[in-house]
């Protein structure tokens, strides 16, 4: 089997017409290719004999616990059904990680029942200042509402955009809109000031109808969101009574903290069921300070530079350098974990697929590392987690049951 035939398999994969045997073969070949090649995937230059490669891959998998007769049906499909070539390196790293992590036992995959659950999608509810509640996934594209000189429009891409129609904006003070994503939902919104916000599943963002005539732009967040803050200038009277033009601060208030920015890209993870509130900076500069009763009010604020993450806990604020790609993987259509305890991983899966999780045992010592697409059905994600060789899963309706892998 040569270059032409692997090209055909790739096209069949993108069209969703691969058989289980072809899928297993193609995935296994990519895993082997990742071990031997450090350059990016270039199908135009492939000249390996895949029959020989499959033989060596087969030997490697048998050594890790697979029986020969099971190899043809050992489906380890990690890719989204879009942009295969663009994401292949991330996928390869994931597959290789799980194969090296521990001996693989096919029983963990056998225990997955035939039922499957589809991934989340663009879903959200918008509550206007007058109390009106709009289901954004049910309404048609176009103008949704007009309030206090602001026109709210839903685009064909499912985004929500605010357009200022009246610069006077009379009567907009103390009026707020709220956008909420349910479990299994995500959404993008363009705020009245032009800032863009991506909301993860089970997230709520409350914001003023207008930021006009305010000294700061303050929003309230519960859950997780990625912000690209627009730079907005304002006039302030200095001590010499002369007007000075400054940038209007943008503040995100979340669980026990406030993040103040002037114009930047950052991610805030502030779910109520997590101990830590994490703020990760990708571009610009932010200042994170504690608030409320979660920590000592006198805890010192921290200033972040790109590539840093602030973590708020009952003990205060800590700062460290992180992989920003991991922090915003959810926004880019991926689950990405770096030695994350299994219960924390399952929280993300639970929110995105709108499932409940039940445990038969203590799995806090089981850690997960790797990446997999959010846009595959849940069975494919659980197949990957099961490759740790320590856990098995069973799907019953909208519930996932986690059990130790039987010897």
Image (cartoon, helix red, strand yellow):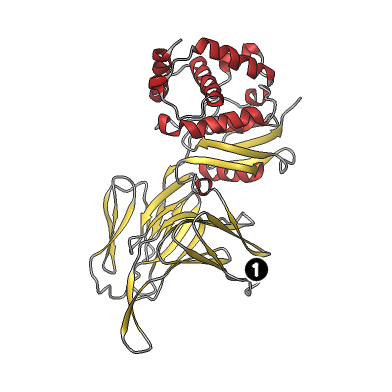
Q: Is residue 183 left or right of residue 399?
A: left
Q: Is residue 15 left or right of residue 334?
A: left
Q: Nearer the viewer, residue 210 or 246?
A: 246
Q: Residue 397, percent across and down?
A: 57, 34
Residue 379 visible: no
Q: Quadrant of residue 283?
A: bottom left
Q: Is residue 346 above or below residue 74?
A: below
Q: Quadrant of residue 86?
A: top left
Q: Residue 187, percent across and down?
A: 41, 49
Q: Is residue 206 left or right of residue 289?
A: left
Give the residue drawn at x 62%, y 30%: 98
Q: Is residue 333 above or below residue 146?
A: above
Give the residue drawn at x 52%, y 54%: 307
Q: Residue 29, percent across and down?
A: 52, 19
Q: Nearer the viewer, residue 398 or 359?
A: 359
Quarter of the rendering occupied by the C terminus: top right
Residue 234 visible: yes
**In the displayed image of the protein, which residue is found farthest to the bottom?**
240
- Mark 1, residue position: 295
> Element at badge 1?
loop
Q: Residue 370, percent across and down?
A: 58, 37
- Give the number of marks: 1
């Amino acid at each position: 089997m040569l270059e032409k035939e692997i090209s055909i398999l790739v096209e069949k994969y993108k069209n969703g017409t691969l058989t289980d045997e072809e899928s297993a073969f193609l995935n296994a070949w990519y895993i082997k290719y990742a071990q031997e090649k450090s350059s990016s995937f270039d199908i135009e230059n492939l000249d390996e004999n895949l029959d020989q490669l499959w033989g060596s891959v087969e030997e490697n998998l048998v050594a890790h616990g697979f029986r020969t007769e099971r190899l043809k049906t050992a489906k380890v499909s990690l890719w989204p059904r879009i942009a295969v070539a663009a994401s292949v390196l991330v996928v390869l790293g994931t597959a290789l990680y799980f194969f090296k992590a521990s001996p693989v036992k096919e029983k963990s995959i056998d225990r997955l029942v035939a039922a499957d659950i589809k991934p989340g999608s663009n879903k959200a509810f918008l509550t206007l200042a007058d109390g009106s509640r709009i289901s954004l996934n049910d309404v048609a594209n176009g103008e949704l509402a007009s309030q206090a000189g602001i026109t709210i429009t839903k685009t064909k891409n499912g985004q929500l955009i605010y357009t200022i129609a009246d610069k006077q904006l009379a009567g907009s003070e103390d009026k707020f809109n709220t956008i909420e994503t349910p479990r299994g939902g995500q959404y993008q919104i363009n705020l009245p000031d032009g800032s863009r916000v991506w909301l993860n599943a089970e997230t709520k963002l409350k914001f003023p109808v207008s930021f006009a005539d305010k000294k700061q732009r303050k929003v309230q967040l519960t859950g997780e969101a990625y912000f690209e803050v627009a730079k907005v200038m304002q006039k302030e009277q200095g001590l010499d009574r002369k007007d000075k033009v400054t940038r209007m601060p943008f503040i995100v208030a979340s669980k026990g903290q406030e993040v103040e920015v002037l114009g930047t890209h950052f991610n805030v993870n502030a779910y109520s069921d997590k101990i830590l509130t994490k703020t990760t900076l990708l571009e610009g500069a932010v200042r994170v300070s504690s608030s409320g009763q979660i920590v000592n009010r006198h805890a010192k604020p921290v200033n972040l530079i790109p590539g840093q993450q602030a973590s708020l806990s009952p003990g205060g604020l800590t700062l460290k350098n992180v992989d920003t790609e991991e922090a915003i993987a959810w926004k880019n259509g991926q689950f990405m974990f770096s030695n994350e305890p299994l219960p924390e991983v399952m929280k993300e899966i639970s929110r995105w697929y709108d499932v409940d999780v039940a445990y038969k045992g203590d799995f806090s010592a089981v850690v997960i590392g790797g990446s997999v697409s959010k846009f595959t059905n849940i069975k494919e994600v659980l197949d990957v987690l099961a490759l740790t060789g320590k856990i098995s899963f069973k799907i019953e309706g909208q519930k996932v049951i986690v059990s130790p892998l039987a010897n």
